[in-house]
Amino acid sequence: MVLLDPLLDRSIFWEEFKDNCDTTFSFDLVPTSFLERYNHLLASTLLTPNKIKLITSDNVTGSYPFLKKLHLEKITLLNLNYKMLFNRNAFYSHGTFAWNNYNILLRYLNEFLIDVDITLEKDELQFDLENWSVRLPDTSRTFYFKILDDSLKVVRTSYNVEDNKENKLNFSIKTSFKKNSKYKISFELKRNEKSFFLGKLYLCTENKEQLINRNKIEQKEETYFAYYTFISNDSYRFISLFSEDYVKDWEVDIININIQLL
């Protein structure tokens, strides 16, 4: 949790607007002080103090005295050395401080997100694209890929598009196919609970495509091999997966792609 100068007591509104000018439309609906309620919540929280950051300044006279009455052993109170240039009264000191310190709020929000989203990489990456007969695929709205330690994970997204350029995942071939020549493509794939068998493939250029069907599968311990043997009818430059051939969330972990001229 990150808090930017929260108001625990609304008495500053009463003091500023003594002519019963209810600018927040809440005087009759909620208590004037929230201090007891928040201290009750802090007493029962399982979060450690470093997980609750409260940003304020002792120059903000409208909120700071009340924030100091919180259970401070349960939070991290950050007192900024903030110079209040136009401190007209307690009400405006709160607004001025909050308005000008969103960058500090974002700094601590990002710190929490970094802790959640970033993995510290320790071991050397075992994924070796040099031995592949193709390059990493192009980006696509209908497929995404992720480099794992020893393989390439390909996942079918939930997008459905009619545009031919966006409905497939293209692997660029390092050496283009020769027309009327016979080839064998071997896919080495991981076996796990989420992975599915590789099905239809296409050979593609900008204006042509050729469907090639899988003709053999071999399973070996934690991997399996999918083989495609065919005669290329053009000088194709890509091996492609088409989105309509694979259901949403289909995925496969590819260890290697090898192309042989027979």
Image (spheres, rainbow, N blue to C red):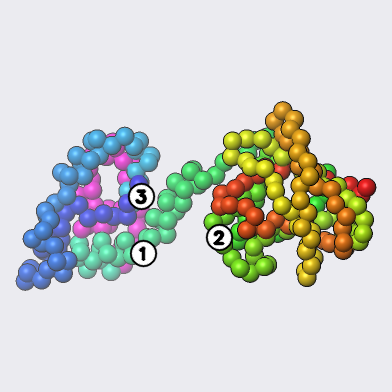
Could you tell me how far apart the alpha carbons at marks 3 and 1 are, in whole angstroms? 16 Å
Q: Which residue is mark 3?
A: 2
Residue 79 location in percent, x, y?
Answer: 33, 50
Task: Please say whether residue 10 is visible from this viewpoint.
Answer: yes
Q: Is residue 66 above or below residue 149?
A: below
Q: Nearer the viewer, residue 35 or 201?
A: 201
Amino acid of disc 3: Val
Res 162 → quadrant? bottom right
Classify mark 2: helix, strand or loop: loop
Seen in the picture, residue 181 relative to 153 is either above or below; the reply is: below
Q: Position of residue 184 (x, y in %)?
A: 86, 47
Q: Residues within 10 Å of mark 1 (few under 14, many from 20)?
A: few
Hey, what amino acid is under mark 2? Tyr
The verdict on residue 60 being magenta is yes
Check disc 3 and report its element: helix, strand or loop.
Answer: strand
Q: How many marks?
A: 3
Q: Residue flagged by tag 1: what amino acid is it?
A: Asn
Q: Residues within 10 Å of mark 2 (few under 14, many from 20)?
A: few
Q: Which residues are magenta?
A: 56-85
Q: Measure how far apart labels 2 and 1 are at the Cα level.
A: 41 Å
- What residue does disc 2 label? 159
Q: Which mark is residue 100?
A: 1
